[in-house]
Amino acid sequence: MPDLRLAPVEPAPNLPVIDLAPGESKTVGRGRQADVLIDDPSLSRVHARISIDEGGQLAIDDLGSTNGIFVNGTEQLSAFLVPGDTVRFGRVEYLVSFAEAPPAPDGAPVVSQTILRRVAMTGAPKVDRLALEALLATSREMMAFQDLPALLERVLDRLVSIVKPDRAAILLVDGQTGAMIPRAVRPSGAYSSVSEFASSTVVHEALTARDAFIVHDIRMDPRLQQAASVMLAGVRSVICVPLLGRSGPIGALYADKLGVEQFAPELAEYASAFAGHAAAALETAQLYDDRERHFRATLEAFAKAIDARDRYTAGHSERVTAYSMVLARRSGKFGSEFETIRRGAMLHDIGKVGVPDNVLLKEGALDPRERALIEAHVTIGYSMLEPLPFLGASLPAVRGHHERWDGTGYPDRLAGTDIHPHARLMTVADAYDAMTSARPYRNALPAKEAARRLRADRGTQFDPEMIDLFEAVEQEFAALHEEPDAAAIRAELLRPVGT
């Protein structure tokens, strides 16, 4: 059986490396009576005992220490250890690994069994021109990538072309469940579940150590000889590199070889480089997604607050968004623009923040000056949102949802097809909700009467094509307005596209 080693995670002059051969036992502490002296005040004089039996099983026992022993972050009185585990004595942390093997007879090279961090190589590493070109190509793509799934697929394809595994995958940690989810797999259909494809032991070791985990020959590693997924697949050699984000592991890059062939040591370096690209892409995409999601949530909360200023229009923005999404999905013309329409509809009245309460909440008829103040909400909203790049495509609907087909609307008196299609669509949704909602000066109109009035203004206020579209979804509008579960249906329509 191979020797085992405990090496300090953060090397320091006062922290020795601890090697143990089968059948050996050593005590650890800061007192001279300990076999291994660790000069740190957080340790007791004789803190713990480490022993390895003839079968290669490594064990650790607390000998009544003050500050305890911790295995992989959990305090233990005694525990069995395997390579990849971390052990903390007081506040000093050690990493368990296989000790370096002695030179083979007759000068024959020795291939290490499991290596954490860097692969040991004799002489200068081989430099593969194709590998460097693939890494440089990936670096260039990362400077301006917009399609994360496609980028991850290309990263994996390039890894496969250089490392030449039998199987490979980029796995991501599900933030809710902690499960490993595949985002790219080669070859396609190589597994029916992640547990069958990638050894959970290997992935766990890599994520725990936060470093590359390389097994050159699984038959020589006691931890993996009982791994069902590995044995069933006939795996011989494995490389697993964690994808590390700012807050810790976010996934793993996994590759293995079947049969008798093994990975060459230098290939682990290339795998680590490709894993770095994948991790950077994922981290960047997550940062952008988080920023946009938080920004969007803030703006939408602001829109709801505007609606809440008037109890008669509470929920107006959400309902207009739901109606707009129904029209957009039925039209068949806006397949790539759903999110743009959703944002524009949710924020279409945000400019009402600039309308005085005595005008916005007035129960009687508005005079010309007050009417002008109300109408200004479209240009106020447009000006508020214009500096935000990710809302640029939604601005025409915010500004134009009160334009009329006959050119008598506001603020720009556009007519016909000069009005943006999103604005023409949203005008129908906005008018329907206004008519079916109560006002201080009138009761809410029945859905059928609102539909009749929309048809009556076909070709004057409304785009005839949009009224034709409304007629195709009239029953869906009525259900969103009248059904007991209308709120739940609207909530599904309000979800951002892609979530």
Image (cartoon, rainbow, N blue to C red):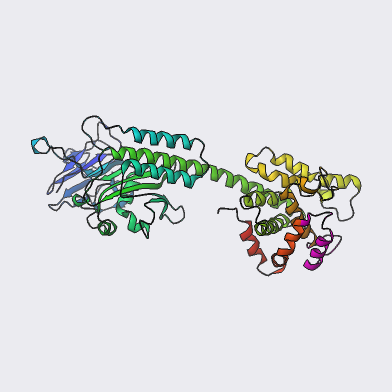
Residue 1, position as x, y percentages in the image: 14, 49
Residue drawn 70% across the image and 67% down it: 479
Above or below: residue 22 compared with residue 316 = above
Please tell me whether the stretch drawn in magenta is mainly helix, strand or loop. Answer: loop
- Please state if 306 lies on the left or on the right of 276 as rendered: right
> Residue 29 appears in which quarter of the rendering?
top left
Q: Is residue 298 visible?
A: yes
- Quadrant where the C terminus sits is bottom right
Q: Which residues are magenta?
A: 436-464
- Please state if 171 lies on the left or on the right of 306 as rendered: left
Q: Is residue 444 visible?
A: no
Residue 105, position as x, y percentages in the image: 8, 38
Residue closer to the observer: 350 or 92? 350
- Please state if 219 lies on the left or on the right of 106 as rendered: right
> Residue 355 appears in which quarter of the rendering?
top right
Residue drawn 46% across the image and 52% down it: 175
Above or below: residue 444 compared with residue 110 = below
Residue 65, position as x, y percentages in the image: 25, 47
